[in-house]
Image: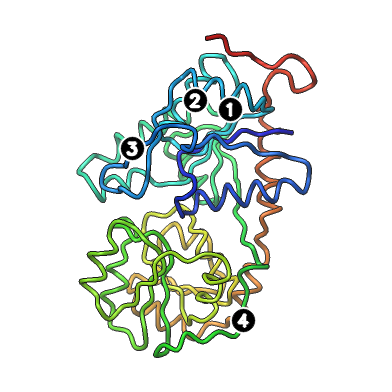
Amino acid sequence: MRILVATDAWHPQVNGVVRTLTKLADAAKGFGVEFTFLTPQSFRTFAMPSYRDVRLAMPRPARIAKLIEEARPDSIHIATEGPIGLMVRRYCRQRKLPFTTSFHTRFPEYVRARVPVPESLIWRALRRFHGASRAVMAATPALASELTERGFANVVLWPRGVDTKLFHPRAIDLCLPAPVFLSVGRVAVEKNLEAFLELDLPGTKVIVGDGPARAVLEEAYPDAIFLGQKHGDELADIYAAADVFVFPSKTDTFGLVLLEALASGLPVAAFPVKGPRDVIGDAPVGALDPDLRNACFAALDISRQACVEFAADYTWEASARAFVDSIRAVGAMLPGRNGAEQPRFVA
């Protein structure tokens, strides 16, 4: 089975969408599913306004059609609502081909954090984008329920995973004053990092990640340590060396970093909002409190072993199987699946 995934988020970006898609493809190889990615790397790009680290593609219809034809997929999945996603959606609609989509980002809240655009208008555009999808994949039951309540059709559950071979407890000392309060992710306005950095906490605050707000925050909070982007074992070591993972975001749909932290034995402190609440629920692995400072202190008393055991239930193989099973269940296979001629593009 060959699945083509159209995504506007791709390397060298470092975010949850890119990590999710990469891990999905790796895990699916184990049961005979091959992924091909249609990404900005195939097109000219320009810097996203207000976020120059992110490059948006400038796809042309003929080029999109040629790349899809060359991939000869059995199914098409649109992961993002950007220029590539829009163009692939158009391709499928014009040819009456089935496709699936996924909902990764709360664009209404992200846009509102930057410009005064009514959220209702953005939700309307998102409903239109996903309206023709055979399945709109959501990471948690709560998000799936919310999308359904907002008028999205064909919403299905696609859980996430974590690489426990990489993220696990280990003896690491960062040689910093304890306790170490860690936050990992994009350093941007929608991540609400000021809510963490302004807290009166003992020990050390550490920020891992990069983004458009980093220079301003580094200058405003000189007592915090900004380490920039970290990957692989270096990132896993930092997780394992910290005492509490602080997640101040109020806009994330899931937050893979929550699972990475928990797999590393790191309890979570967060606001009681949809992202962390959906991941943690009532499990004794995090402290969710409207007062983030109280949450940070409460998390210090949480069992690190409980965090590890909780994360062990989330595997990328299970995530990949759920993704593929959803495509098959909703009939999102293209013509030619059983050997017939695939749809051809004529310029």
CB under 8 Å between callouts 3 and 4? no
Secondary structure beneath disc 2? helix
At 46% across and 54% down in the image, what residue appears? Answer: 15
* Of labels 1 and 3, the one closer to you: 3
Left or right of residue 139, residue 72 in this image: right
Corner quadrant of residue 188: bottom left
According to the picture, the residue beneath numbered tag 1 turns out to be 99
CB under 8 Å between callouts 3 and 2? no
Rounded to the nearest whole Å, what is the CA distance between mark 4 and mark 1? Answer: 43 Å
Q: Amino acid at mark 2?
A: Arg
Q: Earlier in the sequence, mark 4 or mark 1?
A: 1
Mark 1 residue crowding within 10 angstroms, few (<14) / some (14–19) / many (20+): many
Going from the N terminus, do you reach mark 1 or mark 3 first? 3
For label 1, the SS is: loop
Badge 3 amino acid: Phe
Query: Are the residues at dot 1 and dot 2 in contact (C-beta closer than 8 Å)?
Result: yes
Asked whether the beta carbons under mark 1 and mark 3 sit within 8 Å of each other, the answer is no
Q: Tell me the crowding category of disc 2: few under 14, some 14 to 19, or many 20 or more residues within 10 angstroms, Cα based.
A: many
Q: What residue type is disc 4 on?
A: Arg
Q: Going from the N terminus, do you reach mark 4 or mark 2 first?
A: 2
The mark nearer the N terminus, 3 or 4, is 3
- Measuring from the top left, give residue 341's x and y in whole percent: 73, 14
Amino acid at dot 1: Phe
Q: Label 2, on which residue?
A: 89
Say which quarter of the image contains residue 3: top right
Q: Is residue 339 left or right of residue 148?
A: right
